[in-house]
Amino acid sequence: MLLSLEDTAALEPRTAGAKAAWLARALQAGLPVLEGVVVTSEHSDPFLKEGAAQLAGHGSGRARMAITAKQLPPGLTADLSAAAAGLAAPLVVRSSSALEGSGVWSGAFTSYLDIAHSELAKAVVGCYASAFTQATVDRFAAAGSSPARAAIAVLIQPALSPDFGGTARIQGDDVVVIGVKGSPVPLVQGWDPGVQAIVSGAGVVRGSAAIDTLGEAVIGDVAETMRRAQDLVGANTCEWAVQGDDTWLLQVQRFAVQAGGEGIGVDESLRTNEAAALGRLIRRFPGGLGESLVLPWAVADPTIADLVPKAIDIDPYDALQEVAAQVEALTAEVWGMPKPLASAQSREALRTLRGPEPAPALSRFTTLRLPDGERAAEVLGLLQTVRAGLVDVGAVVDEAAAWHVDAASARRALSPRGSRETWSRVGFDRWEPFNAALVAAQGTTITGTSAASGVAFGRMCVVATPSGAAAMRPRDVVVGVHPVPGLAALLFDAAALVTTGGGPAAHLFESARSLGIPALCATRVEDLISCELTDVEADWALAVDGNAGLMHGVEW
């Protein structure tokens, strides 16, 4: 089937894809949308199945080759040529997956510019193949899905030669307009930061650089068009282009809006050397295993962070059973109380430490007895065996991720019967707010431009080169140069995203906002690390404040 954007059937995302369905809704509501033809998603099924079969055995490149070697059915090719004959060349051929109803998938699939009528069939097949680029395959894997489920419709429209282009979004009573001269492609692909203006409900335009570049009339017209799109179809974001006197909507959608919030709150008690030492301990032993089996006794002596574990030859399941008993005794020894009471006291103190007033817990820890060093090294050795065992049974990808498995789940995974649970993502760690506040209190602060709200903490993972992604661990802060779509797969288990270039209109930041990940752009990370990104050697702990547009850092 082929549809016009004026057909009511084009309003269905499962048929026309989210991108085309939103544009059909806008066009039929009287908004300025170019006419277009939609190749419905059902036609992508055999191509995506072929790609998935090749991907399983041969990888991304072979999958794309297999798809591009196929041709559209002759009847569809003929119908497509006839349906598009009335569209002025050159044409734009744009993928429109049902998945793109979520900002998580922003920028995942390919569009083709300046296409001749004779190239239409090849461009349509190219859109199908774009589901199998390595970056998109990685994104599917991170999301726990498959490119075979992409359900890609294809939208064909006349190409524009824009004088200006960009994005706009509703932000409370304001409209935020970001634009560049010419095509918006460099902006949304993360290469050009653009210029930003804010238009109030009364029509007042703020942003001198944007006024100088785009002109107040263009900004005002884009803002008014965005407000009409909100009123008529419920959209809160758009991609736009201006050619001559005409403003056109290239995309309209409604994505989740992150609520703003307070920045990182810092208690004065976190500025002490004792708090800094405790922070290193918590970073060294994170997650469920760290909190339940190390912190209850190690808070008495933060130098435990540097203690070398004792090598122990023992089965991982038996090691976990043994370590639980050892920790119970060690905690009682440190707290000077019977075992049940010591465990309860340690849990309450750790809760207080994570709360808004950590000073009482910090003070209490200084009164505890120092743990026996030999027993402490044995506990850490047993835990090292447990973590290695979790890797061996395939429960986690590496020993760093193993810290984030709670003790009960680890016991099931290591049991001789074996639950064979897997944790490909570790998710939010409840110590992150404390660590963020501690780094904000102790570290160096640099400024950036807010691209997604929220507060996060994590180890810095520089992805300035292709090999950088391989070094990423769960809950790292991804740091790159430009916010390019290829980084999107890393966001599914990242703590935050920071780039030194680009602007908040990039598709990557739409993905970050949809995933609830704080993000900054135009951030001078070099001022923190005192070198180029590609030369950084030390590990850094970063606190990212997407609400205030700040990043704080200390060496890990």
Image: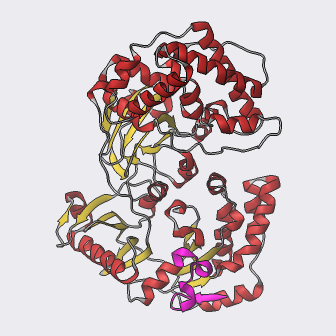
The number of numbered badges drawn on the structure is 0
Residue 12 counted in the magenta span: yes
Residue 468 counted in the magenta span: no
Quarter of the rendering occupied by the N terminus: bottom right
Res. 247 visible in picture: no
Task: Judge from the rendering whether residue 71 lies leftward or rightward of residue 174; answer left or right.
Answer: right
In the rendered image, which quarter is residue 250 located in? bottom left
Range of magenta residues: 1-20
Pick the front one: 16 or 33: 16
Task: Judge from the rendering whether residue 212 lies leftward or rightward of residue 550; answer left or right.
Answer: left
In the rendered image, which quarter is residue 364 located in? top left
Task: Judge from the rendering whether residue 439 lies leftward or rightward of residue 58; answer left or right.
Answer: left
Percent x, y for residue 144?
66, 55
Percent x, y for residue 113?
53, 71
Percent x, y for residue 98?
59, 72
Pick the front one: 396 or 57: 396
Residue at 63% x, 51% y is: 142
Up-down: is 90 above or below 288?
below
Res. 337 visible in picture: yes
Up-down: is 144 above or below 100?
above
Residue at 59% x, 25% y is: 293
Up-down: is 365 above or below 549?
above
Q: Main secondary structure of the magenta part?
A: helix
Pick the front one: 235 or 211: 235
Percent x, y for residue 342?
50, 22
> How does the figure colour the protein chain or chains?
secondary structure
Residue at 21% x, 64% y is: 211
